[in-house]
Image (cartoon, helix red, strand yellow):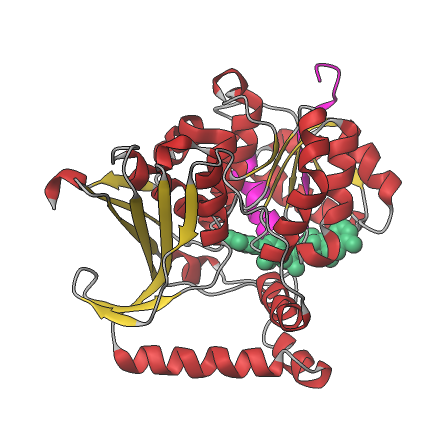
Amino acid sequence: MDDRRFDIVLFGATGFTGGLTAEYLARKQATEPFTWALAGRNRPKLEAVRERLAAIDPALAEMELISADTDDYDSLLSMAQQTRVVLTTVGPFNRYGEPLVKACVAAGTDYVDSTGEPNFVNDIVNQYDEAARQKNVRIVNCCGFDSIPHDYGAWLAARALSDDEPIVVEGFLSGSGTFSGGTLQTAIEAMAFNAARVKLKRQNKPVDPGRKVRSVKTRLHRSKRINGWAVPLPTIDPHIVKRTARILPEYGPNFQYGHYLRVKRLPTLVAGGVGIGAAVLMAQTKPTRDLLLKIRPAGEGPDESKRAKSRFKVTFFGRSRSATSKIVISGGDPGYDETAKMLSEAALCLIHDRDQLPDQVGVLTPVLAFREPLLRRLMNTGIQVENLSQQQ
Ligand SMILES: NC(=O)c1ccc[n+]([C@@H]2O[C@H](COP(=O)([O-])OP(=O)(O)OC[C@H]3O[C@@H](n4cnc5c(N)ncnc54)[C@H](OP(=O)(O)O)[C@@H]3O)[C@@H](O)[C@H]2O)c1
């Protein structure tokens, strides 16, 4: 590793999330030096990003650019061989993601990504976990808003309870924000893909055969403790939470997790349901899918003023036989500003906090890979993590 030219290569820097991540890293360099390069398939676009970064730090006008395309495996391998960590925002990951994971495992290079696609993560676990362990590599999926707050919140809520009793944790997401073209494309492809997909082959067994990890049987209901409607939320987050719980003993002998969106008013709930139902239907055929994709083209996303008004808050309620816990994680624009921060801090954790990280290698969730060191980093950069367990 010591002979690698770069600490971090950012792949996807020409995209919306990648661009914000590049800017975050450029600012971060002043306080926490590291070597890095931008990578992508389109040289002129990479040069334009580099120019933007030079406005933040003039020395970056000279930073290296690496040509890499997901259709050209050798370019991915060469990129992975030059760096200690690849940070990628090249999505949809179901379409583009797998060859890069293969290259990182082959090159012995750590990897973090911004995916939120369950099928992709499931395939990566099944195909590369064993090989990544053998190579002593950390492949860490879901290092953006999907799924860092959820993975950490559930972990903290479970950890506040005794690990010799069954534990139930429920997470309630609220907030505001809008989406980029890349996220829209990814969501539409996932909706079309999921309908056609045969049952997922998940790695469902806890490491210790004496333990159980399951989902709460979620249903739409009105809840006093959140002062609103709890809507079951079928994102990747519950899968990530449960994967962490299968491996770490602090989730107790019998762990259940339930994941919800908190909606304050019934009309908002009905309008949202109709909108999502229509989008799922439209995603099933090409002509209507193309119409949906026109809402926002790839590469575009919410501007700074819209992002400044966006917030998120996830409240986790834990309970065991003898106690309860409550953790609240909140921050700014979830999809992009906070995602750029989380991705960057995760990559920096692999570079600068290496000796404090747990031994776990393979295909990992954020909590499995980073535990306290990333939690400390996130709190230092303005993401609020409150333990309200004593105040209930
Ligand atoms: N889960 C979360 O919390 C979260 C948050 C934000 C984003 N995301 C995910 O992150 C991904 C990116 O989102 P985005 O908004 O940044 O999308 P975007 O603006 O469309 O960016 C996509 C990037 O991928 C690059 N790319 C596409 N095909 C490529 C190929 N064959 N080889 C090399 N590079 C290629 C694009 O390069 P060009 O510029 O050359 O086209 C661009 O840099 C999406 O999957 C999105 O769902 C997840």
x then y, percent, for residue 90: 68, 51
- Give coordinates of residue 77: x percent, y percent: 82, 35
Residue 34 in the figure: left or right of residue 366: right
Residue 106 horizontal/vertical position (percent): 79, 31
The vertical placement of 91 against 129, above or below, is below
Which residue corresponds to the image point at 17% horizontal and 60% vertical from the top-left? 225
Q: Quadrant of ligand 1?
A: bottom right
Magenta run includes residue 87: no
At horizontal 36% and vertical 43% (from top left) the residue drawn is 254
Is 353 or 326 nearer to us in this picture? 326
Which stretch appears magenta?
1-26
Taking the spot 74% from the left edge, 22% from the top edge, the residue there is: 5
- Outermost residue, left direction? 391
Looking at the picture, how far across and down is residue 313, in whole percent? Answer: 31, 53
Figure quadrant of the N terminus? top right
**53 and 223: which is toward the camera:** 223
Residue 209 appears in the picture as rendered: yes
The answer to which of 207 and 243 lies nearer the viewer is: 207
